[in-house]
Image (cartoon, rainbow, N blue to C red):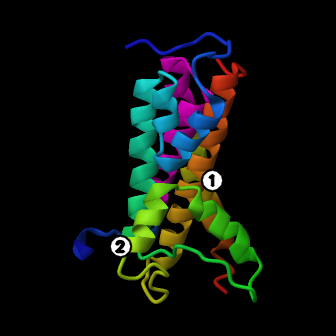
Amino acid sequence: MIALIPTDHFVIMTLYALLVSAFFSLLWRQDRRERWKLFATLVASLVLGGLAVAWLMYPFPR
Amino acid sequence: MSEKNQSVALPDRSPVLAMALAWAVPGLGHFYLGRRRTAAAFLVIVTATFLIGLSFQGRLYSIEREQPLTILATFAVYGAGLWNVAARAFSENPVGMILAPTYEYGCAFLLTAGLMNLLLILDAHDIARGRKP
């Protein structure tokens, strides 16, 4: 069980982005097509935004 | 099963009961309001988020006088309803394991699960009142 728990930052961030995006796309949209569109937008925003912030923080490790 | 899309109040459904059910089990308020597929999806998403938080050794916050922000965190975690109550009752270590590499992630997942369910409570209220299609 312990071995199944991911410790990779990117994997955990992506998992979090998927869950949050699925939740808000179901909460905020009624139409199936609109839901998929919002889901894709949110996942891309969260993952790419996280990578962008990580890149900006790279020169400042502490 | 068709979802209800009309923006009218549901006279045979109590908003208070919908909110109480939504707090107790994620998605149950929506199930009560006839939105069964959405309810099932919310149940899976919020429960998965909560269980991942537990498996990451996150903390089920309790209020500490020295740290006022724990009031907000406790409110958020208690939003997860009976999942939070059960986890506190049956978990070996409800305060989490601060030395675990996934501790901070676990806290984030647990807080998020509670906040998601708080939004579901408000959503169930709006649907029952006819404020949301």
Q: Which residue is mark 1?
A: A49
Left or right? Give the position of B44 relative to A43: left
**Distance from Cα at disc 1 to Cα at disc 2:** 37 Å
Nearer the camera: disc 1 or disc 2: 2
Is residue A37 in the magenta section?
A: yes
Query: The disc numbered 2 marks a residue on which chain?
Result: B
Q: In this picture, is B96 found above or below B37?
A: below
Q: Which mark is residue B19?
A: none
- Tag 1, which chain? A
| Observer-nearest of B104 and B2 | B2
Q: Which residues are magenta?
A: A13-41
Which quadrant holds residue B114?
A: bottom right
Q: Nearer the viewer, residue B111 or A56?
A: B111
Q: Residue at x 38, y 44 (%)?
A: B44
**Residue A20 image position (x, y, % from top left):** 53, 47
The lab-note entry on whether marks 1 and 2 share a chain reads no
Amino acid type, callout 1: Gly
Residue A23 screen position, x and y as percent: 52, 40
Q: Amino acid at mark 2?
A: Phe
Q: Secondary structure at mark 2?
A: helix
Q: Height in image: A61 above or below B108?
A: below
